[in-house]
Image (tube, rainbow, N blue to C red):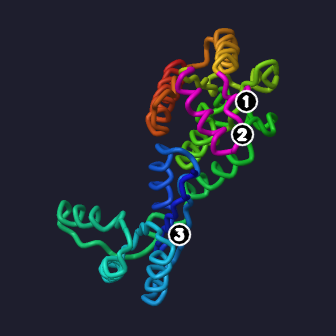
Amino acid sequence: MAETTKKIFILSDSTGDTAEKVVRAALAQFDANLATVQIFPRVRAEKEIEDLVERAANEAALLLHTNVNAEHRDLLDRLCTEANVEHVDLIGSLMGTLSIFMNAQPRGVPGGMYKVNDDYFRRIEAVEFAVKNDDGQHPRNLARSDIVLVGISRTSKTPLSTYLAQRGFKCANVPIVKGIEPPTELFAVDQDKIFGLQIASEALFRIRQARLQQLGMPADTAYGMKDHIQREIDYAQQIFDANPHWPVLDVTDKAIEETAATMLAIRAQREERRRNHR
């Protein structure tokens, strides 16, 4: 019998972006479709808070919040406790620790992270770029990217692209499909931009079998068969071997943040070498 999809409510007195990033990063460690996330931004009135707690109770949702207003945090804690709603304060304890550490009181102004500046717009543009250039769409745009990810299906190309975009990097990804040549544009761009992604066959088998189950498809579909998976991995390795300048990162059992950190470290080293050779 299929598990019931859980509900997660994110309540914020600002945009909710901070909490969403934390939650998405945590959910990446679980099977997909176990939970749905709904964001309630700019909740700044007590009546709105009361209504959302009541709704969370009725729908058995987990309530996460990032309210900088201390009174509203206290209200949320009391209401959730009374209604038996599971809840997590994602910012209150951190603000308290910072206040003690810096011997200063927080301003309590919502949206302090999101002052409109060049960096903010750069991140927004990068996220839009990642969405438009996901899964090999518009290969002509590869030249405009900061990073290009290459790998077979389910090697974390899309979540990595999204994570890097949130860091302000324009990231595109190109799927490797057995029997189909990669787009010619991939080999025309600066090859320092390109990173290969690989994964152990057993890990990929488990991921794809779980995916087939979620989609209600037969377990013996070619996409999830061990021999088919191995042929895909071998084909990808042939492409990587033919392009030794591409760093190839193993994403097996790796968190998105860990893979991204390795990738950005390599990228920084290459940029440093370029500067030193000018």
Task: Check the image and report above or below for 208 versus 17.
Answer: above
Depth check, mark 1 against mark 3: the one in front is 1
Instruction: Determine the secondary structure under disc 2.
Output: loop
Disc 2 residue type? Met
Q: Are marks 1 and 3 in contact (CB under 8 Å)?
A: no
Instruction: Determine the secondary structure under disc 1.
Output: loop
Residue 217 disc label: 2
The location of residue 91, given as percent across then percent down, is: 34, 65
Task: Check the image and report above or below for 24 versus 64.
Answer: above
Q: What is the distance, in whole Å, between disc 1 and disc 3 at their CAs?
A: 42 Å
The location of residue 90, given as percent across then percent down, is: 36, 63
Left or right of residue 97: residue 141 = right
Left or right of residue 110: residue 158 = right
Left or right of residue 13: residue 205 = right
Disc 3 residue type? Thr
Question: Which region is colored magenta?
Answer: 201-225
What residue does disc 1 label?
221
Instruction: Determine the secondary structure under disc 3.
Output: loop
Query: Can see residue 278?
Result: no
Q: What is the distance, in whole Å, between disc 2 and disc 1 at their CAs?
A: 7 Å
Mark 2 Cα-neighbour bin, 10 Å: few <14, some 14–19, many ≥20: few
Query: Residue at the location (48% across, 80% down)?
Result: 52
Q: Are marks 2 and 1 in contact (CB under 8 Å)?
A: yes
What residue does disc 3 label?
15
